[in-house]
Image (cartoon, rainbow, N blue to C red):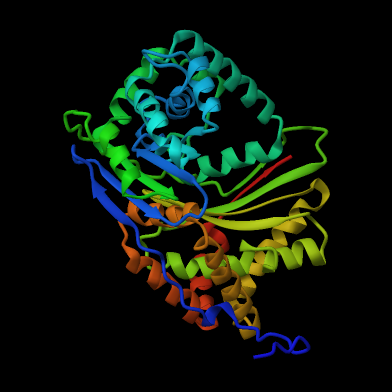
Amino acid sequence: MILDRKASPAIHDAVTFDYKLPPINKNVLDNGLPLYWLDAGVQDVVQVDWIFPAGLWYEQKPAVAHATAGLLKNGTSKHTSEQIHEALEFYGAQLKVAAGNDNATVTLYSLTKHLPALLPMVLEIITEAAFPEAEVEIHKQNAIQRLLVNLRQCEFVANQKIDALLYGADHPYGRYSKKETIEALTREDLVTFYHNQYDLSNVRMFMAGKVSEKDVKCINDIFGKTTFPKKEIKQLLFTPETAAEKIHRINNDPNGVQGAVRIGRLFPNRHHPDYSPMVVLNTLFGGYFGSRLMSNIREDKGYTYGIYSSISPELNGGSMIIHTETGRDVVENAIKEIYHEMETLCNEVAPDDELLLVKNYLLGGLLGDLDGPFSILQRWRTLILNGFTEDYFNNNIQIYKTITAKELQTLAQRYFGKADFHEVVVI
């Protein structure tokens, strides 16, 4: 067959494609620890995640979760921080530790062939972190310095304020770092949190890349031979205490020429039936560069370089927030237009061609996510950590493909009431 180079190839909408999440394997190590893994790589690289219930939700004292994560690899009972970092550099590997609202994640990136050399080091870091006093003091000084610099930035202050208004300043999702809370941290605080939360009996492990049963055996030989008593994680309960006052204006810099705008409300997490349909509505409203907010407030009015809305689902709640930075002289005009776009979505059905564009954008993004082992692993991590199966992924695909403009209008009427949103402007 001769290819006709004068004829354009057929164009297919992403909504017509079939989407299948590649399967993930689950092995139970000799000591009962779960390992989820998939072989989906063509390069000799691997990502391994160890996920612990060690996020802000489990803090007994403010700022301890981030500090513990930040210092986990800065020395063990056998090796100094310098020795650990030199070993990682020798193998061309990267080890990251980060604490989020719910979990803390230890992530190793490496050539697959170096796993036998690197895994014992990771096990030592996870089980024998020392938190040297000198390292704790350096971390506190650096954290305070970063905080003082960030507090001069209107967008940083606005992010702090909106979360505190939605959840309450004492809620884990609304609590933010302060100079005095960082200063009050002690090595004993970190050690206590580390022993309580970074316990192997509660870890979940994930691995992806160019891997095989041989690499699974390697993990089992190192992590599956450890013994430990089962430690029950204390389930903490927090109820959001949303501020009664809805409008907040903060003068952070008398000479500032730019204002950070945050408009937000609480919103259910992934377990709520409205979450997945709301992903579609949020994308149309402010979730991508062609959204209503961007077209109006950036392209038409010229009030900002960028404006977005986002949904942040956590294990124990969630929020929806619109965020932008504008000139201080047009802040109120921008806010007025944000509510105008909400009202329009409540009162008018979106055109079919606009909804098709949004669906193609969402599903096209999914195609990219299903193209590499690390992004596929991220999809599976989200499902597993939230207690979902592949059915949840498949159901979302159907929602993205079939949701109607009328259904989006009903959803907008349910969640886009101006009275439900809090406003923060920081200049």
Q: Nearer the viewer, residue 411 or 147?
A: 147
- Give coordinates of residue 238: x percent, y percent: 34, 41
In this picture, is 254 found above or below 179? below
- Give coordinates of residue 102: x percent, y percent: 39, 41
Instruction: Say which residue appears at 76% left-offset and 86% top-offset.
Output: 5
In this picture, is 14 found above or below 4? above
In the rendered image, the quadrant that contains the N terminus is bottom right
Q: Nearer the viewer, residue 88 or 139?
A: 88
Quarter of the rendering containing residue 118: top left
- Give coordinates of residue 207: x percent, y percent: 39, 46
Q: Nearer the viewer, residue 168 or 309?
A: 309
- Give coordinates of residue 330: x percent, y percent: 80, 53
Q: Nearer the viewer, residue 91 or 8?
A: 91
* Camera sees residue 94: yes
Quarter of the rendering containing residue 357: bottom right
Give left or right: position of 248 versus 169: right
Instruction: Say which residue appears at 46% left-offset and 44% top-offset.
Output: 46
Quarter of the rendering containing residue 56: top left
* Camera sees residue 236: no
Instruction: Say which residue appears at 60% left-offset and 42% top-offset.
Output: 159
Instruction: Say which residue appears at 70% left-offset and 87% top-offset.
Output: 3
